[in-house]
Image (cartoon, rainbow, N blue to C red):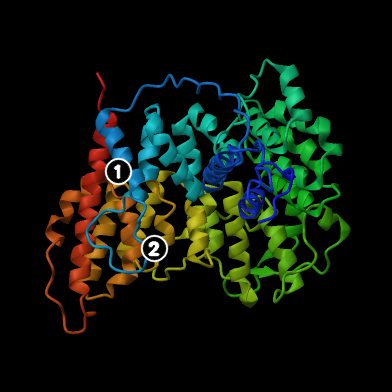
């Protein structure tokens, strides 16, 4: 071997390729990175290779030590009772769920109970155990519906953790006031500075909070920078006025009808139409009244409909979209928009002093009933008019499950949302008693939890009837899942007689009896578990 009189300098210290090259050439011919020539060179080469191997396996580059994070903020809320803390650990550990489409067996779906557990814990003002925060944030990361309750329960320490782990960065955007405590109403300078200089998410959070406390102050804040806002931001800002919407908002919304953005104009018009005393509502009522009247020339008083002949500039300014969707006639499209934006109080005077129920019962000429009633449904929901909602819903036991006014069960579900919780539950219970569960799923979803006694009994009775009739059991899996989360736990005792496997009828689905028994057993077990959860959260820590 020919040896050179002096080793060659290694050009790049710490590079793995340099170490490999030096090892191949020999330390006599090539100096190890950051090493010295001579008899210690092989040892320096091996030391550098060992250090570099550890770094490669760790996936990190050596770097100076960063500044230590500040301690997490204190959470002064009371600690969970020990039994409730253990239950939270169980709920967060159950990630399997009931997916896969197969039979679920009798075990409760714990992850589906987590939202209720969080709501109850937040209502009692408990703090999250520090050791549960990582699993809680992971659960909220995977399920956006959990985030508001999970972050409220996790408290300020969740934001502290989110700043250290990119996987949890959603918490910095989703938590109310997550960029720092929002300024109080008296801190006008800080409010103005945050509104003018903050990020969009910060400004939205600030506007929503002020709107909740002082609607007028929020509107004035928005008006001060409105002309310089981007169109997409203006849309979000004007939509925030839904909270606390009132007559004082009308001048600002009237100005927004002339906005450059079509979406902003449409949202402003929608909000104005939800104010029955607004000038826009009066203009819409005048237009709509010209289209609907009672025809007394027939043997029975009948509603006659004459659609608008054009969509002029003033209609477009008031939020009427001129271009109809594909497959929809232009004139019926314009009519529907006029009707849904008109105050429902218009129609009693226009149609002979009749009540909403009497108006809905009138026949409608020329097959316009569907269009007319559907538009009135949208108006009742927008204006939160319970009298018209009751009229359009009709009696729950009526032969037609679709009702006299709603064109679909989805419309009925929206109408039910305008009624009080007790009335809503009674109506749905009557609907189930008359029509069964096959069409009731959407209606059950708008009822307050836990379901009121009559509604819960109606659901259990209907499930029992479906089982005894040999119905296909998987058709009711959605209702059964709702029942697990929404039935009052006090109903568990009523299920004891339904836990045995029934004798299968000749025309029943194969294995249906076993499925029903499993489903009722799971339902009973889940209800008892929910009862235990409530007791654990109600226990005192001493």
Above or below for 103 versus 37: below
Above or below for 225 versus 343: above
Query: Which percent across, then down, holds residue 261?
Result: 82, 51
Name which residue lies at 75% across and 65% down. Answer: 334
- Labelled pair 2, 1 in contact (Cβ < 8 Å): no
Name which residue lies at 56% across and 24% down. Answer: 68
Q: Nearer the viewer, residue 538 or 454?
A: 538
Which quadrant: the C terminus?
top left
Secondary structure category for the residue under label 1: helix
Residue at the disc numbered 2: 440
Query: Which percent across, then down, holds residue 423?
Result: 39, 47
Residue at the disc numbered 1: 90
Q: Which of the two discs, 2 and 1, sits closer to the camera?
A: 1
Query: Which percent across, then down, holds residue 42?
Result: 57, 43
Q: Is residue 140 left or right of residue 300?
A: left
Query: Which percent across, then down, holds residue 304?
Result: 67, 70
**C-alpha separation, residue under disc 2 versus residue under disc 1:** 32 Å
Q: Is residue 288 left or right of residue 136?
A: right
Q: Is residue 98 left or right of residue 10?
A: left
Name which residue lies at 24% across and 41% down. Answer: 531
Which badge, 2 or 1, is on the more N-terminal residue?
1
Place residue 134 in its image quadrant.
top left
Secondary structure category for the residue under label 2: loop
Name which residue lies at 51% across and 33% down. Answer: 161
Which quadrant: the N terminus?
bottom right
Q: Nearer the viewer, residue 163 or 210?
A: 163
């Amino acid at each position: 071997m020919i040896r050179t009189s002096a080793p060659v300098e290694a050009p790049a210290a710490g590079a793995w390729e340099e170490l490999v090259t030096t090892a191949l050439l020999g330390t006599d011919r090539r100096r190890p990175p950051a090493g010295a020539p001579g008899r210690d060179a092989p040892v320096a080469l091996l030391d550098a290779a060992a250090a570099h191997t550890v770094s490669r396996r760790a996936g990190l580059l050596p770097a100076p030590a960063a500044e230590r994070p500040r301690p997490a903020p204190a959470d002064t809320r009371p600690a969970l009772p020990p039994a409730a803390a253990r239950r939270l650990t169980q709920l967060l550990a159950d990630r399997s769920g009931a997916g896969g489409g197969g039979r679920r067996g009798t075990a409760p779906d714990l992850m589906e109970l987590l939202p209720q557990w969080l709501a109850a814990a937040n209502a009692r003002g408990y703090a999250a155990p520090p050791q549960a925060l990582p699993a809680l944030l992971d659960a909220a990361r995977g399920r956006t519906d959990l985030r508001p309750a999970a972050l409220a329960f996790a408290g300020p320490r969740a934001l502290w953790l989110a700043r250290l782990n990119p996987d949890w960065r959603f918490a910095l955007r989703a938590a109310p006031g997550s960029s720092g405590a929002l300024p109080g109403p008296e801190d006008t300078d800080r409010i103005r500075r945050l509104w003018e200089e903050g990020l969009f998410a910060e400004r939205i959070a600030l506007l929503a909070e002020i709107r909740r406390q002082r609607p007028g102050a929020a509107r004035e804040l928005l008006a001060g920078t409105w002309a310089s806002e981007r169109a997409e931001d203006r849309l979000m800002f004007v939509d925030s006025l839904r909270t606390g919407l009132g007559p004082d908002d009308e001048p600002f919304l009237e100005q927004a009808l002339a906005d450059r953005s079509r979406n902003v104009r449409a949202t402003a018009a929608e909000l104005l139409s939800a104010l029955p005393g607004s000038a826009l509502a009066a203009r819409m009522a005048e237009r709509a009244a010209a289209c609907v009247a009672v025809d007394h020339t027939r043997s029975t008083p009948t509603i006659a409909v004459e659609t608008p002949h054009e969509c002029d500039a003033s209609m477009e300014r008031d939020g009427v979209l001129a271009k109809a969707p594909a497959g929809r006639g232009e004139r019926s499209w314009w009519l529907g928009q006029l009707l849904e934006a008109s105050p429902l109080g218009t129609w009693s005077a226009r149609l002979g002093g009749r009540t909403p129920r009497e108006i809905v019962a009138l026949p409608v000429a020329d097959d316009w009933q569907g269009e007319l009633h559907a538009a009135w449904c949208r108006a009742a929901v927008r204006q939160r008019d319970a009298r018209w909602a009751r009229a359009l819903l009709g009696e729950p036991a009526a032969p037609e499950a679709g009702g006299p006014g709603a064109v679909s069960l989805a419309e009925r579900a929206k109408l039910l949302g305008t009624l009080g919780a007790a009335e809503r539950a009674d109506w749905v219970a009557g609907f189930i008693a008359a029509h069964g569960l096959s069409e009731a799923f959407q209606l059950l979803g708008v009822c307050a939890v836990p379901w009121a006694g009559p509604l819960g009994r109606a659901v259990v009775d209907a499930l029992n009837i479906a089982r005894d009739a040999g119905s296909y059991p998987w058709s009711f899996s959605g209702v059964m899942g709702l029942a697990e989360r929404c039935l009052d736990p006090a109903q568990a005792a009523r299920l004891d007689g339904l836990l045995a496997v029934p004798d299968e009828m000749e025309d029943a689905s194969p294995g249906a009896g076993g499925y029903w028994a499993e489903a009722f057993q799971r339902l009973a077990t889940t209800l008892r578990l929910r009862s235990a959860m409530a007791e654990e959260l109600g226990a005192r820590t001493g």
